[in-house]
Amino acid sequence: MMKQGKLLITGGRGKTGARIAERLDVLEYPYKTTIRNPQAITDPLKEVHFDWYDDSTFLPALHHVERVYLVAPVGDPEPVKVMKPFIEIALKQGVKRFVLLSSASISEEGPVFGPVHQLLKKLAPEWTVLRPSYFMQNFTEGQHAATIARQDLIISAAGQGKIGFVSAEDIAEVALRALMDEEAHNTEHIITGPDSLSYDDVSRIISEVTGRNVVHKSISDDELTRSWLAIGLSKEYAEFMTELDRKIREERSEDLSTDTVIRVSGKTPVSFLQFTKKHAGVWSSIGSDHKI
């Protein structure tokens, strides 16, 4: 077992970071999570102020740290610009292992997370890149939650393209192993749920479980880009997000089903039907929470 504070979770209140922290609590495994707003810190023993865009927060966050879970800053089309200095400082401070949250849609040669993936392979003694498919939690905590609650709609530009939707808990289990295993993984893990589903399939499952008439509306790429801009994304990042849907629709980029969860964690991945039955009550209340 590691000494206090030897594992740092960036994005500590996001979908995966919070779940990793919960599992570490159960295992009584010491860690620190990062909080961007210092006023929001409630447990100074487990939370530390950190901001990707304020390098004065880097060293304090890295105090006595040997392993780091990396979540890129949300909405930044070139996160390597701020992550590279942090990774270099972390290496100088003795950090040995890095686990990066990336995306199944984005290879190491791809945009956004790709350059960070390449950087870790080049510089880090021990590394893992997690490449999960789309989160099931997007329907309960993310961008689809409010449209389901208010309009019985799921909106995308993915058409009939299929996606290996995966639970954030399952991603966290793989991350946990990558962080804690004695032997470094030194590889990428493409992480999916057990089924590859279209948004129409998802709508049908939610409808059958909840009794609501939820439908999927596939919109144009331009419409989707405008919707991303409307919630405050930059033009470059909005176009990047739309391109992901186009690839799902036209190139089957997320039509995946891997054995990663059970192979790495030993746990059977949650199906979307199981997820929907567990969270059916969520769609009876209006609201959304855009966590990563």
Image (cartoon, helix red, strand yellow):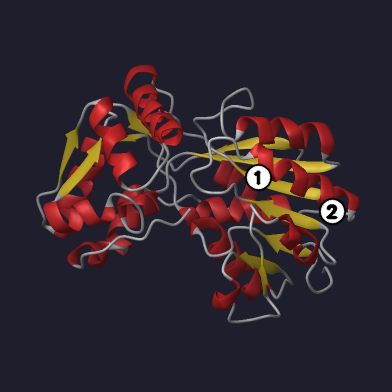
Left or right of residue 289, residue 50 in this image: right
Write down the quadrant of residue 43 in the picture: bottom right
Could you tell me which residue is drawn at 71 percent across and 80 percent down? Answer: 45
**Numbered disc 2: secondary structure:** loop
Looking at the rendered structure, the kind of residue marked 1 is: Leu
What's the CA distance linking mark 2 and mark 1? 14 Å
State the residue in front, 147 or 267: 147
Residue type beneath disc 2: Val
Relative placement, left or right, of 255 versus 19 is left
Q: Which residue is mark 2?
A: 95
Give the residue displayed 44% in from the left and 57% down from the top. 291
- The x and y percentages for residue 105 are 49, 30
- Give the quarter of the figure containing the N terminus: bottom right
Mark 1 is surrounded, within 10 Å at the Cα level, by few (under 14), some (14 to 19) or many (20 or more) other residues, namely many
Query: Picture quarter containing residue 240?
Result: top left
Q: Looking at the image, can residue 266 be seen? A: no
Are the residues at dot 2 and dot 1 in contact (C-beta closer than 8 Å)? no
Nearer the observer, 226 or 129 = 226
Rendered location of residue 143, percent (x, y): 32, 50
- Where, by quadrant of the figure, is residue 221 drawn? top left
* Residue 23 drawn at (x, y percent): 60, 67
Local crowd size for mark 2, using a 10 Å CA cut-off: few (<14), some (14–19), many (≥20)? many
Q: Is residue 89 above or below residue 159?
A: below
Residue that badge 1 annotates:
100
Position of residue 29 in the picture relative to residue 20 (left or right)? right
Which residue is farthest top? 250
Q: Earlier in the sequence, mark 2 or mark 1?
A: 2
Task: Tell me, for residue 82, which label it has, or none.
Answer: none
